[in-house]
Amino acid sequence: MNLPDYTNCTLCPRMCHVNRSVTTGYCGCSSHISAARAALHKWEEPVLSGPEEEPGGSGAVFFSGCTLRCCFCQNSLLSKDHFGKKLTVNELGDAFLRLQDKGAYNINLVTPTQFFPDIIKALDLVRHKLHIPVVCNCGGYECPEIISLLKDYIDIWLPDFKYFDNELAFRYSKAKNYFEQASASIAQMIRQTGTPEYTLHPSSVPGRPDFPLMAKGVIIRHMVLPGHKDDSIRLLHWIHQHFPEHSYLVSLLSQYTPYTKNPDYPQLNRRITSYEYNKVVDTALELGMTDGFMQQKSSAKEEYTPPFDLEGLD
């Protein structure tokens, strides 16, 4: 394992080469791990969070900072304001084990790229006690070379694939080479995990059948943005043409919510329409992309953002 360290940081495509032990990188983070929450999360895809009526959930650890600058970020308290509590490697490992003890179906690393070196150290400390999969829940703006180094640590990849058009990527996320980085990184994730695999988990509800949980694989997330269904449709066509069939799941999100009115991006100051979302879903079905998930339109609400109250980090 030869991950770059924090003294000349090249963990993400920004390649800022900052010494994060002295100052912060583009991500806004120093060399100290920082997180805002470690708790069971019920709002991931069903193969990660399980059925709503079950007591478990995805063991989500929300890290501070981000390598993107999405103007519509629902977790801006973390990504832009860098809210969080500093943790040692040992404390992070303990948080993983507490989540497992609480009934987490997996350890869900949310926006972890900027802390990969210490996350790996924490996993090394506890992996002999950790018996659930590790999920990397990221924005897709990654380096394939870094992804390849994580093969023995990440079981499930949950990347966003936000844009086909790099002009949109730069306008909304300040990432001019987003498509190239995301497409190459997701391709590497698929090569590493292979065909998705599942385990059956016994239900705690009498009379209900066992339910499937992902053990290994890739779920590509895409959130449809208002006014940009055509970009979503082009992206689905590209995914269908370039990634092997049945080697990934697609999760089409309708949950876009404008948390504030942004005068710089007036086109984003509304939720998507049913027509926009349904056109994207129809495209996926026409292409035969039936391995995956779609959301009800009513999912566009604030409950998908948990309280960032340092739960699970004491």
Image (cartoon, rainbow, N blue to C red):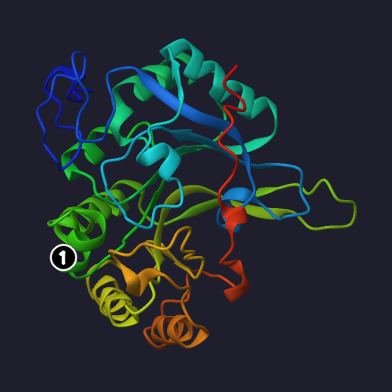
- Give above or below for 77 relative to 92: below
Residue designated by label 1: 166
Q: Quadrant of residue 312?
A: top right
- Residue at coordinates 34% horizontally, 20% vertically from top-left? 118
Q: Amino acid at mark 1?
A: Asn
Rendered location of residue 155, percent (x, y):
42, 41
Which residue is farthest front?
Answer: 263
- Residue at coordinates 73% horizontally, 55% vertically from top-left? 52
Rendered location of residue 251, percent (x, y):
46, 65
The one of 46 and 248 positioned closer to us in this rendering: 46
State the quadrant of the N terminus: top left
Locate residue 103 relative to residue 208 in the image: left or right: left
Residue 81 showing in the rendered view = yes
Q: Residues within 10 Å of mark 1 (few under 14, many from 20)?
A: some
- Give above or below for 95 relative to 147: above
Residue 199 showing in the rendered view = no
- Residue at coordinates 74% horizontally, 54% vertically from top-left? 210
Rendered location of residue 97, percent (x, y):
59, 22
- Residue at coordinates 55% horizontally, 49% vertically from top-left? 305
The one of 185 and 296 positioned closer to us in this rendering: 296
Q: SS class of the residue under badge 1?
A: helix
Q: Quadrant of residue 262?
A: bottom left
The one of 144 and 169 positioned closer to us in this rendering: 169
